């Protein structure tokens, strides 16, 4: 895996209005990145104003979604170049909430990953099994399928970073993260899947596998210390400045 600095991604979901987003961004502005790479993902409506607050800081900006076409009559959608225009460098793709509520399929995820890469945005590809899939013993299978379908046939330049976020659907937002060794096992499965898809050197240099699902300041180091794990994707614990700053310090 890539030996870059730890990646910490804040997913604000649809939980903050514009003023709350601006207040939170201002409180985070002074944060020292402490040798970590920090990405803030506000909702679409807050992207540009937050980008203005984060200007000239070490914090990077990401979107929570993207559309796969470059432009055209697609009411309500947002293209990769629009995301770049407002200062995004990253984009979350295929979050389980979108798979569940917006019926996003692996095929849609694949098209979005391609669109992001074509615009030199770093895709943060979310994968994860549901509780039922885990109980059925199908977790590894589901993850291999999701990773493969998202990335199969994609031509990656050696300088294009990609993030794969393992987010077990059944622990997101529960306050109870998965046991770190279980995440470690899955990260190994994801790594093997990537090796089956891409040359080893590319997997080592371009891919980062991160964990998401009820990460907070007290458990973050259990995940960032895992082998094959380059960071975390954080929902609830990224919505409050003091908690998130502690989390960054502890990562
Ligand atoms: P959580 O959300 O940290 O609140 O569990 C993580 C996510 O959905 O990305």
Image (tube, rainbow, N blue to C red):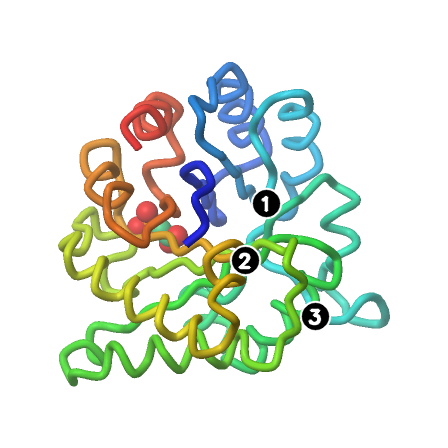
Taking the spot 17% from the left edge, 52% from the top edge, the residue there is: 180
Question: Mark 2, mark 3: which one is toward the viewer?
Answer: 2
Position of 82 with respect to 94 (left or right) is: right
Q: Nearer the viewer, mark 2 or mark 1?
A: 2
Say whether disc 2 or disc 1 marks the residue closer to the N-terminus. Answer: 1
Q: Is residue 63 left or right of residue 204?
A: right
* Residue on which disc 3 sits: 68
Residue 133, numbered circle: none
Q: Which of the numbered marks, if any, corresponds to residue 162? A: 2
Residue drawn at x 50%, y 81% as measured from the top left: 149
Q: Earlier in the sequence, mark 2 or mark 3?
A: 3
Mark 1 = which residue?
A: 62
Query: Which quadrant: the N terminus?
Result: bottom left
Placement of 151 over or under 166, stated as above or below: below
For the residues marked 1 and 3, what is the alpha-carbon distance in whole angstroms? 16 Å
Find the distance from the CA under tag 2 to the CA under tag 1.
13 Å
Q: Residue 99, how many percent across, how many down?
A: 45, 72
Vertically, is 92 above or below 129? above
Quadrant, the C terminus: top left
Please say whether residue 105 is visible from this viewpoint.
no
Q: Is residue 75 left or right of residue 117?
A: right
Residue 247 can be seen, yes or no: yes
Along the line of sight, which residue is nearer the eye, 62 or 73? Answer: 62
Give the camera-side residue of 113 and 83: 113
Q: Earlier in the sequence, mark 1 or mark 3?
A: 1
Instruction: Name the residue at 65% across, 40% down.
Output: 47
Query: Residue 204 placed where, x, y %?
Result: 46, 57
Compute the Cα span from label 2 to label 3: 17 Å
Whether residue 98 is situated above or below residue 27 in the rendered picture: below
Q: Residues within 10 Å of mark 2 (few under 14, many from 20)?
A: many
| x, y percent for residue 223 | 24, 45
């Amino acid at each position: 895996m890539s030996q870059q600095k730890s990646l910490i991604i804040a997913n604000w979901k649809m939980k903050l209005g514009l003023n709350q987003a601006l207040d939170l961004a201002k409180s985070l502005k002074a944060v020292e990145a402490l040798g970590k790479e920090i990405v803030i993902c506000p909702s679409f409506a807050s992207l540009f104003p937050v980008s203005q607050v984060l200007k000239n800081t070490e914090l990077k900006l990401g979107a929570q979604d993207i559309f796969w076409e470059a432009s055209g009559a697609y009411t309500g959608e947002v293209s990769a170049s629009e995301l770049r225009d407002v200062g995004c460098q990253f984009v979350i793709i295929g979050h389980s909430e979108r798979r569940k509520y917006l019926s996003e399929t692996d095929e849609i995820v694949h098209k979005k990953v391609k669109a992001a890469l074509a615009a030199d945005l770093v895709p943060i590809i979310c994968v994860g099994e549901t509780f039922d899939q885990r109980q059925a013993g199908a977790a590894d299978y589901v993850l291999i399928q999701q990773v493969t379908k998202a990335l199969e046939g994609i031509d990656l330049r050696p300088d294009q970073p990609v993030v794969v976020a393992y987010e077990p659907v059944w622990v997101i937002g529960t306050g109870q993260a998965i046991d770190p060794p279980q995440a470690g096992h899955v990260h190994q499965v994801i790594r093997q899947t990537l090796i089956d898809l891409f040359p080893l050197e590319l997997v080592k240099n371009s891919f980062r596998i991160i964990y998401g699902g009820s990460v907070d300041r007290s458990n973050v180091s259990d995940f960032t210390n895992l082998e094959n794990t380059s960071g975390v994707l954080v929902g609830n614990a990224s919505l409050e400045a003091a908690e998130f700053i502690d989390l960054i310090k502890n990562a």
